[in-house]
Image (spheres, rainbow, N blue to C red):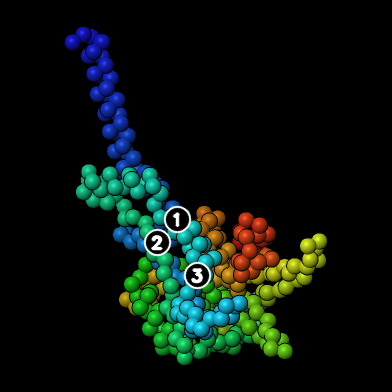
Amino acid sequence: MGQLGQELIAEAIVGGALIVLSLAIAFVVYPRWWRRPVRAFFDLGGRTGTVQIKLSCLYVNPEGARGITAVLRGFNGPAITEGEYRAALGLANEIQARPLSAFVEMIGAHFWRRELSPPLRCDISLSPARPADASMPPDHDKDGTGGEIPPEHWIHAAAHKVFGTGGTFVLVGAPVYNVLSDYVLRTVDTHAEFKFYRVPIGCGDYERGIVVRHGHQRGGGTGYVVEAYPRREAREPGEAGDRIRYTEYFIVQKISGVRIGERRATIFVCAGNSTAATVKAVEKLTNWRTLPSQGDFALLYQLQTYDRELIGDPNFRAEEVRPMWPTDST
């Protein structure tokens, strides 16, 4: 073999060694480097790698919807909204492993016979259904008082069954349709409490909105501050006819160290007073890098939209979101 052949073989060996070394570094460093921030934010330490996303549970009555064709018996049972489900898929896609990361971990597990770090997964499912004979969440007054009724026994049982396993949970939806949100907002001590209020204004109508109470612990003292944010409607004339601009509100809250049963849980609440507002709350959490990275937080946002139930084309949906509380939130 000539000198040229020996040089080519040597270069091939060195090149192969560099490739193996690069892959080895990638196996060890890349998954840990990429996953560290998301694990820290969602409290996915140790061997835990699953985020449970619990959607609103809407119970459809047997009669179904009225339409041109007579419905003798329509679908009945638990259902979800398309908007919430799409938003949950977007959040799951943000949290779960990217294809390259998953490939790197698979190769690492094959060669080292162990996982370099536990895989990140999201489990999307319905929150427990509210029984037909169960009462709806109590109405809170505009000052945040009233409605201080402990959750019914079945809600306690459902919450303990879900949260008792520990881990990280994302609750999607307001208390009316998500009993887990109802339970957390009524029972868990936080530095800021959010209340979804409803007060009568006559002729069978109600004013709805969100109240934030802060500066106190649940059940202690009266030195807290109350701020109410009512939803509004404004008719705007246009060339194609009048349209209504809706002012809605939503919350994004992180509560860590919640002890329900034998284990501790980290709970995120994404809830608004309309479908569009709740979806925006989930989208805000999906952009988790823009949220506070250290400790718990409680944020309130305003949404202005012409389509609060997300029935129009999402590509032509004019929306505007701005932070409301605390005033320095983003």
Q: Which residue is mark 2?
A: 122
- Dot 2 or dot 3: first in sequence order is 2
Secondary structure of residue under mark 1: helix
Residue 19 vs residue 196: left or right? left
Vertical placement of 136 versus 185: above or below?
below
User: Of label 3 and label 1, which has the lower sequence position?
Assistant: 1
At horizontal 45% and vertical 55% (from top left) the residue drawn is: 93
Residue in the foreground of this view, choosing between 270 and 100? 100
Question: Where residue 38 sits: x, y (%)?
Answer: 43, 55
Q: Which residue is at the far front?
A: 69
Judge the density around disc 3: few (<14), some (14-19), many (≥20) Cα neighbours within 10 Å.
many
Residue drawn at (26%, 28%) of the image: 17
Q: Secondary structure at mark 2?
A: strand
Q: Amino acid at mark 1?
A: Asn
SS state under label 3? strand
Are there few (<14), some (14-19), or many (20+) residues within 10 Å of tag 1? some
Q: CA distance from mark 3 to mark 1?
A: 16 Å
Which amino acid, mark 2?
Cys
Q: Mark 2 and mark 3 in contact? Answer it, CB < 8 Å.
A: no
